[in-house]
Image (tube, rainbow, N blue to C red):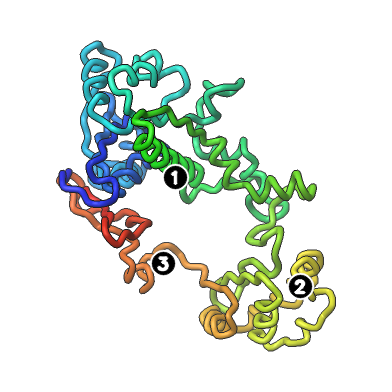
Amino acid sequence: MTDATTGPLAGTRVMDVSIMAAGPWTGALLGMLGAEVIKVEPPAGDGTRWVMPTQRGMGTNFISMNVNKKDIILDFKTAQGREAALKLAATCDVFVQNFRVGVIERLGLDYESLRKVNPRLVYCAISGFGETGPLAKAGCADPIMQAFSGFARANGAPGDALEAFRFTGFIDLTTASVATEAVLAALLEREVSGEGQKVEVSMLEAALEIQATRIAELLGAGLIPHPLGSESPGLAPDRAFQALDHEIFVTVHNEGEWGGFCEAIEHPELAQDTRFATSRLRVTHRAELNAAIEPVIRAKPAIWWLRVFQRKGVPSGLAHHFETFRHHQQVVANEMIARVTTRDWGVVSVGGVPWHFSNTPCEVRA
């Protein structure tokens, strides 16, 4: 691990005792922002070390979730381990944990215990369902929260079986982003008050936050979310279309883009069709709209459509496989995938930093 850091959080020290995904990614984000992050693992190690697939025996999940960190081992179940943890916490600005509610108290590393040794500590507690309520102590994981929060019922195509989004743990990652935002806000507030505070974040609240528009649709308009495949409940056309060779995604936000879309597909009469005159009408007559568009798109290659749509100002994009996406000139030009050399696992590839600061550049470090 490297000691020198850049980024707006340079000089900030984080103690990360979390495991699996939401907590470790919070620590990784803080590390990318320049903080010194010390990951504390139990003697058995973080379970993601053995999640498949692996690189030189180490889970790639673990590698990606724990960039920009130093690593030590402490056994919190022993008096010596707890004492060492308290001493380390006394030197830190931020503490991150995502144990089940009640576990951290039994280990003696709860907020009240750490505040006694470090009143300026920002203590970030990440849970599955929140720290109160009948499910407070229940275990949780990304697909569990997708199911509980309604995502799994709204995924997939109409009539398909229940479907969880498994390419990446997006609720875990969203929770980490929310937790990082909260930690940064608490650090700012500490500059005013001089005191740290406890920050509570739950996967459930993060899942609801990213469903803000769905909640408004349900409670305000009575629209119950249901599977639509790649389509949007509020716009049309806004979906993936099968072209001659590959799929292409097209989104029409307004009547100006709708006119451009009709010109692009060389069917200007659709722009004059009263069934499709407004976004609301296009959603209402979605089936007829799709029936008119699908055979036209299917007749020509996706790249041809991409160029035509772009000339007409219609938002569109090819449906890449990850293998082609990672080599795209836009990804390469912006260094969106980072390659770092590690002592034990060789050269590893992970996502690059998602922010670009002019004065305090961020980086991914081994």
**Left or right, residue 22 beside residue 231:** left
Q: Which mark, residue 166?
A: none
Q: Residues within 10 Å of mark 1 (few under 14, many from 20)?
A: some
User: Does the rendering let one see residue 18?
Assistant: no
Q: Residue 61, image x and y in percent?
A: 35, 44
**Left or right, residue 276 beside residue 25:** right
User: Does the rendering let one see residue 263?
Assistant: yes
Q: Residue 26, image x and y in percent?
A: 38, 40
- Seen at 31% across and 64% down, the residue is 335
Q: Nearer the viewer, mark 1 or mark 3?
A: 1
Q: Residues within 10 Å of mark 3 (few under 14, many from 20)?
A: some
First-in-chain label (1 vs 3): 1
Q: Which mark, residue 289?
A: 2
Q: Residue furthest front?
A: 192
The Cα–Cα distance between marks 2 and 3, rounded to whole angstroms, is: 30 Å
Q: Nearer the viewer, mark 1 or mark 2?
A: 1
Q: Nearer the viewer, residue 284 or 159?
A: 284
Q: Are marks 1 and 2 in contact (CB under 8 Å)?
A: no
First-in-chain label (2 vs 3): 2
Q: Which quarter of the image is occupied by the N terminus?
A: top left
Tag 2 secondary structure: helix
Look at mark 1 in the image and give the residue it sits on.
Answer: 177
Q: Residues within 10 Å of mark 2 (few under 14, many from 20)?
A: some
Look at mark 3 in the image and give the residue it sits on.
Answer: 325
